[in-house]
Image (tube, rainbow, N blue to C red):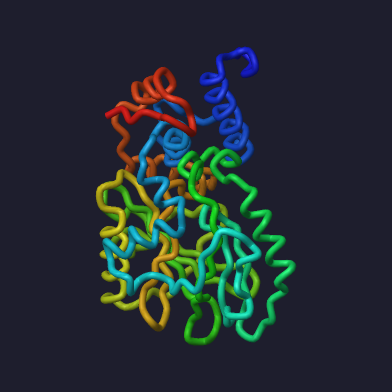
Amino acid sequence: MVPARLLPRRLATWAEAVATLRRDFIAAQGRPPRLLRPRAFSDKMQWRKLFQPDPRFAVFCDKLATRDYVAARAGEGVLVPLLWQGATPEAIPFERLEPPYVLKPSHSCGCFAMVRPGETPDPALLRAMASEWLSYCHGTARIEPGYIGVPRRLMAERMLLAPDGGPPREYKLLVFDGRVGLVQVVDRLPRGFRVAYHDRDWAPVAIHFNTPASDLALPDAARRAAIITLAERLAAGLDHLRVDLYDTAAGLHVGELTCYSWSGLGRTTPPEADVRLGALWRIEAPARRALAAVAFGRWGGSLIAVS
């Protein structure tokens, strides 16, 4: 392989992205990714990260823009209450934010600070954290180009609670071509969490990512139907989208819409389940589209859409 430093800048960008992606994938999955003829879910996610440009991804990677998308498709009633948004740590109005709430960046994933009921926040500490968030680009760090170019802002949302005061149950639904293919149920505990996996009809399926599956009680039939309907409404028109929902006493709330589910790095048990899940995700002419993207586009920038 020609060193990236010896290639034209556009091709060097591709080489750097592919090298970083391969390194991270091998560390997580124990094998190289299959990029031109992907079959497994994890491989198809790497293909998306490199070769599938879609302007909607920038919306899903922007937590504030996602709110507008969700409201347009499902109404404002499913949004988590937004308490504040702004561009600088100095502007965070701690004196007006009443706990419990969650402070987070709008342009990243996995970064947040929780101020729980009855807690007194440390403004200096939280502003320092927020400053670090604003300096971080999730897109280049994780080879997820939808995050590149998203405005870097801060936001505070009301912390959702279950009736007992603990965290609410989460449902992470993997939707393919507008149809739910897998439901991950997550109950968060004081230490760790328990998960279960079901198909669209809520039958248990023999698959789990990293954490072993548990036997969890499910909501009633009406709630289950509402969960499926909401997820499919939000993901309609996309070949794959993950819809994260919180189930609270006040109803269902949308957490995130994720186009890079777990970055495709979660290992499935059994291993062949990765291929079974990948079979639900249809990608037309992956090799041709990949080669066209490299030939005519620039990774993370002006990628062309090849139909």
- Kindly tell me whether residue 269 is visible in this rendering: no
Q: Residue at x 56, y 33 (%)?
A: 21
- In the rendered structure, the answer to whether residue 111 lies left or right of residue 226 reads right
Q: Residue furthest front?
A: 91
Pick the residue in front: 266 or 107: 107
Q: Position of residue 284 (x, y in %)?
A: 29, 31
Work out whether residue 93 or residue 45 is closer to the camera in this orientation and state it: 93
Would residue 132 be seen by someone viewing this image from the given angle? yes
In depth, the one of 87 and 126 nearer the eye is: 87
Q: Which of 212 and 51 is in front in this view?
A: 51
Residue found at x 60% / y 32%: 20
- Quadrant of the rendered image containing residue 98: bottom right
Q: Where is residue 271 in the image (x, y as percent from the top left)?
A: 50, 43
Give how far across and how far down residue 118 sits, in percent.
64, 86
- Locate residue 213 relative to residue 276 in the image: left or right: right
Residue at (33, 52) in percent of width and height: 175
- Taking the spot 63% from the left edge, 76% from the top edge, the residue there is 94
Q: Is residue 187 left or right of residue 223?
A: right
Q: Position of residue 112 (x, y in %)?
A: 60, 63
- Quarter of the image for the N terminus: give it: top right
| Quarter occupied by the C terminus | top left
**Can you say whether 8 is above or below 172 in the image?**
above
